[in-house]
Image: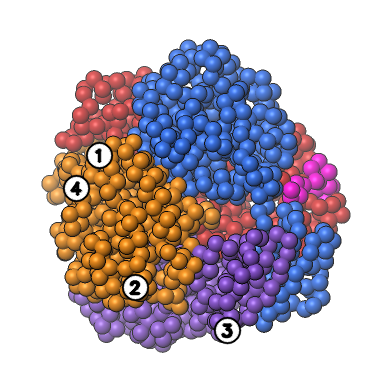
Chain colours: A purple, B orange, C red, D blue
Amino acid sequence: MIISMKKHASKKDIEHVMQKFKDAGLQIHESIGENYNVFGIVGDTSCIDIDQIEANPYVEHVQRIAAPYKLANRMFHPQDTIVDVNGIHIGGKKPIVVIGGPCSVESEEMIERIAYKVKEAGACMLRGGAYKPRTSPYAFQGMGTQGILAMEKAGKKTGLPIVSELMSADKLDEFIEHVDVIQIGARNMQNFDLLKAVGKTKKPILLKRGLANTIEEWIMAAEYILSEGNPNVIFCERGIRTFEPYTRNTLDLSVIPIIKEKTHLPIIIDPSHATGDWKLVESASLAAIAAGADGLIIEVHDDPENAMSDGVQSLLPEKFDALVEKGRKIAHVLGRDLL
Amino acid sequence: MIISMKKHASKKDIEHVMQKFKDAGLQIHESIGENYNVFGIVGDTSCIDIDQIEANPYVEHVQRIAAPYKLANRMFHPQDTIVDVNGIHIGGKKPIVVIGGPCSVESEEMIERIAYKVKEAGACMLRGGAYKPRTSPYAFQGMGTQGILAMEKAGKKTGLPIVSELMSADKLDEFIEHVDVIQIGARNMQNFDLLKAVGKTKKPILLKRGLANTIEEWIMAAEYILSEGNPNVIFCERGIRTFEPYTRNTLDLSVIPIIKEKTHLPIIIDPSHATGDWKLVESASLAAIAAGADGLIIEVHDDPENAMSDGVQSLLPEKFDALVEKGRKIAHVLGRDLL
Amino acid sequence: MIISMKKHASKKDIEHVMQKFKDAGLQIHESIGENYNVFGIVGDTSCIDIDQIEANPYVEHVQRIAAPYKLANRMFHPQDTIVDVNGIHIGGKKPIVVIGGPCSVESEEMIERIAYKVKEAGACMLRGGAYKPRTSPYAFQGMGTQGILAMEKAGKKTGLPIVSELMSADKLDEFIEHVDVIQIGARNMQNFDLLKAVGKTKKPILLKRGLANTIEEWIMAAEYILSEGNPNVIFCERGIRTFEPYTRNTLDLSVIPIIKEKTHLPIIIDPSHATGDWKLVESASLAAIAAGADGLIIEVHDDPENAMSDGVQSLLPEKFDALVEKGRKIAHVLGRDLL
Amino acid sequence: MIISMKKHASKKDIEHVMQKFKDAGLQIHESIGENYNVFGIVGDTSCIDIDQIEANPYVEHVQRIAAPYKLANRMFHPQDTIVDVNGIHIGGKKPIVVIGGPCSVESEEMIERIAYKVKEAGACMLRGGAYKPRTSPYAFQGMGTQGILAMEKAGKKTGLPIVSELMSADKLDEFIEHVDVIQIGARNMQNFDLLKAVGKTKKPILLKRGLANTIEEWIMAAEYILSEGNPNVIFCERGIRTFEPYTRNTLDLSVIPIIKEKTHLPIIIDPSHATGDWKLVESASLAAIAAGADGLIIEVHDDPENAMSDGVQSLLPEKFDALVEKGRKIAHVLGRDLL
């Protein structure tokens, strides 16, 4: 951490600031120039609160050099983390996983029918929402517990592990019992109580990036989960909010090499929410694989125009099938396979 | 609602789409041109899911004309809602309220001391956080229940109603018992389970705008609370996330006349989080009053550089005092007072 | 175009608005409901100014259905435009082109040396800046005419067509004489006088997307060029500005399928400016090819740390070479080649 | 400037980087820690190109401490710059100026008529566009030279100095002869050749902030003008592009105190383009004055629905009049007047 003190800071003002670092057992390196007094603070500064230091009126600027996260940091954990979902391995150089399924579970029959279709098309996990975060209180809010149980049944019949979104910690026991991968949605990426709750389990957690959260904030959200003892975090990019109205969000694929450089955790891509338009999903999916993603999570529905949510971004099973085939070939170019 | 069907849509395709509207008891007005077939759907369309219609491959475009919210809509509730907080009235042409206090409650002594200072300087309510949403799991997370009880005590001694952030529904009973205004933070603006929970109470709810949420999404979040039966919603703008790195957020004051046109609910401004820098708080506060805000919520601390959070954006009590004085004069120009 | 008139608009008010459309020879379809009066305007509305209509106090909302561009519109020009650069064809199902070279031409010797290196590595065109748009007036502004002549020489020796940025119409003759593809930079995307000027030539124009311009604005910029008589426009996405500080810009690859659906023009990707970091360039390049791009334009330098500009995002020739090899294999998966 | 070198950088690698600073006559202060080697570079670093340093593979991070601008920097020019427009003084504690007029000059008669109306309502300068940057090539592009001459005439008759936008350097002589304040539009904020051209004159330059430009980039654009010898720069904020669709742009009033702290130049606000809706203009204008602006530039039209551009955001003269009255009272609260 580097602190620049204002030119007119007195020796006493400076000492006052530095005392806090000394108290924290950190080393201080001084570099006094004509216009600025600069101090390098050496040691584990991840617990230092930058805001607090900047509140001092004699401090010009504080710059963190070391990342504010430790457990997610590749520097201290060089090997890739491989998350195991009922024997399916995500991360590292492992085969790329494709997760398919509807936005919402609409009935027991429907989720089973689509589960078979996505499995046939090459998916190795089943997605589906039973608790739905909807902008409008008047929109379909999901089937709740019945949806979770229907997914579990469809998962067991097809042999596909299931992924579903948890919106509130009071349903955590239900998810621990019936769901294989717990999804934290974009809107809850900084719902810190929910992050702490899932951090206390050992379940694989699919952590979506928030609508307008930086990569660093996203890694810090993972750090919340890791610091409670759960190492099984899978990042999921789903597009960020920008000024562009044509797409629902703007898919930021640069996060793939960045997350892999900064952290040791796997990262997958959700092209359905990123684009909001099924016609753009194949292009985005192939790009994600080429960019180095560890997996894809794609909305598939066999009757999109009657889907209870997100029909416009859902692929028909046959289109999903074609996408998986092309994706596999791109994976091969990168020396990976597609599960 | 206006639906444009694609040029090559057959009569049957069109009928298929229109049947849904007929089933919902809506009227349909047809306008068939050379290149497009346009249909106006008349009636209460707030429950119609646009996404679902757009999923139909023959639909070119859907445009909502009526707003998707009803209870918050000024069209159906022309008079201003006045929220009553222990006899302090917020909204309408009522005097502008100023809420002051520290970011975090740090001790019983500290919150009491600052409560007296902000009261003296002209605040009519006390803010303070006991449960803190922090980016880092290693940062101070707040005093919890002890903080709430300390605030309650300081509030009773000074006669100031208290405002504090609720992060999780499992603390709702504590807030109902001890807190006067429940704040929903920016990161939880679309935590729909939390919105539903506070909607079941009658407490005044301070609903902050999310980091990157549109005005319409924000009103829909209020609609969640209203639709559960709680009419006491106060909007609070605290800046949105943009590309500009100099300020913590970009304060969007245009929301004041927009919220007042579209809804009947009061709106206040948080210049502290919006700017992230105490030196910018006075300018933003006076601008907010001039723009028509019903109130301000400002971070005040008497020892910012030792504050446990947000010191850099906290005003000293004497600066807060000067701000209140100027703000009062601007309120007078607009024909309002400052409580 | 669809116009919603306010509920309380009188018959006379409505007629007043509609008269303008009648005068323009457009057909009007009426749909009068309980709360809204909706009118469909049919015919060529691309010259109608939406702002002007919305200025009428009785107009609630105007929605354009037809795109505001004609010449760029695939609807009226279904076949792909192939831009011919000295025999190299860009667009359609043609082989993907790779353009390489330094950010700035630094000397005659340097540009020739790098030209040979990028050619060897598989580039089929040479990029290089002689007029440089720099944020700071104190930064290197480019070699100017000497740089253009040096590029031309290097291009002739290696047989590579050259691409360079034109910043001001007063240098247009120089570019027409010496440069093969004229680049319009992101900062000049809406420099309409410059667009009109290059529209009067027949030179291929590489039109970069502006920092914060929507896809529609970008196509309208192309429309400026096309409407002056020059059909040879190549779109180039180079990342947009978002809140994320880690990358220089956020690369928006969704534009590839969108531009190809909406227009008939080719589109290439600039992963160097998009990411601002050479370590991210390969991932972004492969993703661009997988997403369907018609080409790449990549910064290459053999001594990045002494480059006079953009060293940090320049690839070493050997890394560029490896990238081209992988890119070719991905192109094959999509049934294309890499030139 | 502070440079962090990577942990594994050898002594020779470090010396290689530092040699450049020594060659530039800068002093180097070393601070070597366990994980990082930090160097403070002291002296005038405004000409150092950060990108070039970061291109070195052993450099971890470069942080500029001193601002990259000199002539605009208040540190080296503590007193306020007052720009003189035919005897009207802008900046410092001088009275706030209000500039009014139509978006476009539509005829000699029209600009004269509106000039009298805005003068009567309290404007001290006249705005009007003769060269219009329009998104569409099919939209009205302005009257050109005839418009400039008509404005000049209206200005002379009413005694109001005139402000108009210059889009291309080839019209500079015309503007020098006939226009009082040359406006550089948002889309041309980084048209560096245009900035250099107006920098060679002594005319007051109204420099609008670009759609998505940071405050630092904006100051650097001013620095281009200043460094060519023209000290008469007036900043003009007109809203930035964000994700919010309701307003045309998002007005960022925090720039007022920031520009005043960082630079010595005046700053005015354009609430018309910022909001894009006349109903929001008064609120934004009063907020701007309360925030400390040195002036306002407002679109006024007496027949908005027949305006050839921007009618929807133009105020009627009577509304403009009312706004000026309220603005004056708010100026008084801040101890200023309104010219």
Report the quarter where the N terminus of chain A lies: bottom right
Name the subunit of mark 3: A
The alpha-carbon separation of the residues under discs 3 and 4 comes to: 55 Å
Which residue is rendered at x = 39% and y = 60% of the image?
Answer: B299
Label pair 1/2, CB-CB below 8 angstroms:
no
Q: Which residues are magenta?
A: C138-158
Whether the magenta-drawn stretch holds residue C142 is answered as yes
For mark 3, what is the residue? A25
Q: Position of residue C328 (x, y in %)?
A: 64, 64
Quadrant in which residue D187 is drawn: top right
Name the subunit of mark 2: B
For mark 4, what is the residue? B81
Label pair 3/1, CB-CB below 8 angstroms:
no
Indicate whether D122 appears above or below A77. above
For mark 1, what is the residue? B39
Quadrant in which residue A189 is drawn: bottom left
The alpha-carbon separation of the residues under discs 2 and 3 comes to: 29 Å
User: Which three-letter amino acid code belongs to the residue tagged 3?
Assistant: Gly
For mark 2, what is the residue? B109
Indicate whether D181 appears above or below A65. above
The alpha-carbon separation of the residues under discs 3 and 1 comes to: 71 Å
Q: Earlier in the sequence, mark 4 or mark 1?
A: 1
User: Which three-letter amino acid code belongs to the residue tagged 4?
Assistant: Thr
Indicate whether B4 appears above or below A218. above
Q: Position of residue B295 (x, y in %)?
A: 31, 50
Which residue is at the front of the view, D199 or D92?
D92
Q: Is residue B288 left or right of residue B248?
A: left
- Would residue B238 be seen by someone viewing this image from the given angle? no
Q: Earlier in the sequence, mark 1 or mark 2?
A: 1
Q: Residues within 10 Å of mark 3 (few under 14, many from 20)?
A: few
